[in-house]
Image (spheres, grey):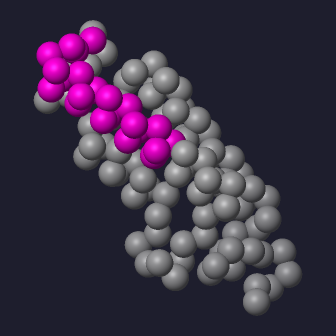
Amino acid sequence: MCDTGFTGVACQMSAEEKEEFKQIRKTAILAAKEEQARGKLQSPEAQKDFVASFLADNDDEADIDPEVINELAESQADYAAQMVEKLRRKRNGETLSDDEDID
C-alpha cells in the first residue's frame, strides 16, 4: 500500500506523474503506428528495443496501464503482419519502393 498521494508498483509516482507517463507511452505507440501505416517499418532489432523500452528490468516492477498494453499489443500485431507481407513480396520478387528496408 502506498502513502497518500503516491501510486505505482514501487510507490514512486504521483497520480499526475503516472498519467503523464501513460500519455508519453501512448504517444510513442501512436507515432510508431503512423510510421507503420506509411510502410516504414523498423528493423527487428529496433522493434525489439522499442518494446523493451516499455518493460521493466524486473517483472515485479512492471507498471504499465492496461490501455497502454492493449495499444502496444495492437501495434506489435500490425508490425508483424506488415513484416510478413513485406517478406512475402520479397520472396515472390514483388518488392515495392518502401520494401527497401528489408534485407
The location of residue 11, given as percent across then percent down, is 69, 79
Instruction: Examine the rendered structure and indicate whether residue 50 appears above or below residue 81.
Output: below
Direction bottom: furthest residue: 1
Residue 101 visible in this rendered orientation of the protein? no
Direction top: furthest residue: 97
4 vs 86, nearest the viewer: 86
Q: Quadrant of the N terminus?
A: bottom right
In percent of the image, x 40 and y 58: which residue is there? 52
Per the rendered image, the range of residues in magenta is: 75-96
In percent of the image, x 30 and y 35: which residue is there? 84
Instruction: Examine the rendered structure and indicate whether residue 45 appears above or below residue 5.
Output: above
Q: Majority secondary structure of the magenta segment? A: helix
30 relative to 5 in the view: left or right: left
Instruction: Examine the rendered structure and indicate whether residue 60 appears above or below residue 24.
Output: below
The location of residue 16, given as percent across then percent down, is 79, 59
Q: Quadrant of the C terminus?
A: top left
Instruction: Examine the rendered structure and indicate whether residue 10 appears above or below residue 62.
Output: below
In percent of the image, x 40 and y 37: which residue is there? 81
75 relative to 18 in the view: left or right: left
Task: Kindly indicate the quadrant of the structure image that contains residue 96.
Answer: top left
In percent of the image, x 23 and y 30: which residue is there? 87
Residue 65 visible in this rendered orientation of the protein? yes
91 relative to 12 in the view: left or right: left
Task: Kindly indicate the quadrant of the structure image that contains residue 7.
Answer: bottom right
Q: Is residue 77 magenta?
A: yes
Q: Is residue 17 magenta?
A: no
Task: Kindly indicate the quadrant of the structure image that contains residue 69.
Answer: bottom right
The location of residue 37, given as percent across then percent down, is 49, 24
> What number of labels is visible?
0
Direction front: furthest residue: 92
